[in-house]
Amino acid sequence: MSGRLNLVLPEVLANPYPHFARLRRESPVCQVDPGGMWAVTRYADVIHVLKNPQVYSSAGIQRTMEPPWLGHNPVAHSLLVMDAPQHGRARALVSRAFGASVLTRLEPMLRATAEQLVSALVVQRTVDFLPALALPLPAAAIGHLLGLDASLYPRFKRWTDHLAEVSATTESDQEGQKRIRHTIQEMEHYLREVMAERRREPREDLVSGLLQARVDGEALTDAELVAFLFLLLVAGLETTVNLLGNAAVLLADHPELLARLRAEPALVPAFIEEVLRYEAPAQSTFRMTLEEVELGGVKLPRHAVLLLHLGSASRDEAYVPDAERFVLERPERGHLSFGHGAHFCLGAALARLEARVVLEALLPRIRSLSRGPEPLQWVPSIQIRGVTRLPVEVLPA
């Protein structure tokens, strides 16, 4: 291949999958832009890296998430960027927030919220699907868990969008850099205010629980708490908003899918899994080599930054037969949209629940979902895949 593939060019964002297929065939481990990271695109190589944290470090990628122009980024100090044993202790603190009992208590609120949102959508008929349905339900879920102000939910999405752009922002993009720095300052100020309020008046929410938590007998520092909350807010919104948005694009572009799901609602969970595989909302994650190593036939130096392309791995023909086709009743074969191993997404069950609740509220109420001829605009990120807006017209049932 001549020249590096630039993953954030508009034409690549519009349809990256032929590019990934070519990389899997010709250069399964190669440098890409922006940044010259080593993209790993085959399933076997990606899973090998994820299974060997002693060679491929999560903690080592901190500098990738804190480029010189950015300075401080709390996400770069969260459990996402930790190796054992620190990662295990940190994960144990927040895992209870996503346990089965918590989801059981949360589900009635999610279903009531989804019914209200769908009722409003059906009345309006022509809406932007993201602020109408894909954003407010996940925002309500994560806001409920953290005890956050519901009036700020639209601001949360703006914050998380900006943070998702860090790895795709170039040295020359002064305006983008300024926007991201401002977002981090604004977000950190808000979260520290929430923490101060919970210290004064504890509630039954995760922020209050984390303030009272102890690791080896010691309380978490404010910086550690902020890092946790940044990660939970970003991961809690981005994954599900984009899962719902990508699902809506597929339903609009393939009306036979919508008709099939309306006729057979028991297929909704299978549909969600195939959306996660076919149009993964979490496209990639990072690791750093701790020693010189060979991967995919390529010798990598010590401290090479790897971009593990989960979206490409989940479409690897060597792993998934007929991988480039959306197959509703595909025989179960695990995808990598939620990662693998020690860093498997804590919120996977919550994201699946939210998507199921939305679709089970929406599908009985509409006969069709259509979008205009204008091309989709995709979020300029190498980590997530989602549209920036999704104007649709619904035909009530």
Image (spheres, rainbow, N blue to C red):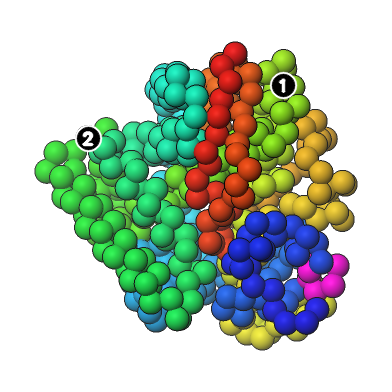
Magenta span includes 186: no
| Residue 207 vs residue 181, the one in the foreground | 181
Give the number of marks. Answer: 2
Give coordinates of residue 29: x percent, y percent: 75, 74
Q: Is residue 171 left or right of residue 343?
A: left
> Label 1 crowding class (10 Å Cα cut-off): few <14, some 14-19, many 20+?
some
Q: Is residue 58 left or right of residue 105?
A: right
Q: Which residue is mark 1?
A: 259
Q: Earlier in the sequence, mark 2 or mark 1?
A: 2
| Residue 339 vs residue 34, the one in the foreground | 34
| Disc number for residue 203 | 2
Amino acid on which disc 1 is placed? Ala
The residue lying furthest to the left in this view is 200
Give coordinates of residue 372: x percent, y percent: 60, 39
Q: Is residue 56 above or below residue 197?
A: below
Assign the C terminus to one quadrant of the image.
Answer: top right
The stretch in magenta equals: 23-28
Amino acid on which disc 2 is placed? Arg
> Label 2 crowding class (10 Å Cα cut-off): few <14, some 14-19, many 20+?
some
Q: Residue at x 61, y 68 (%)?
A: 9
Q: Residue at x 72, y 46 (%)?
A: 278
Would residue 262 be seen by someone viewing this image from the given angle? yes
Q: Is residue 31 left or right of residue 102?
A: right
How far is the residue under mark 2 from the one under mark 1? 44 Å
Q: Residue at x 55, y 29 (%)?
A: 393
Q: Is residue 316 above or below residue 149?
A: below
The secondary structure type at the circle numbered 1 is helix
Give coordinates of residue 92: x percent, y percent: 44, 48
Would residue 305 be seen by someone viewing this image from the given angle? no
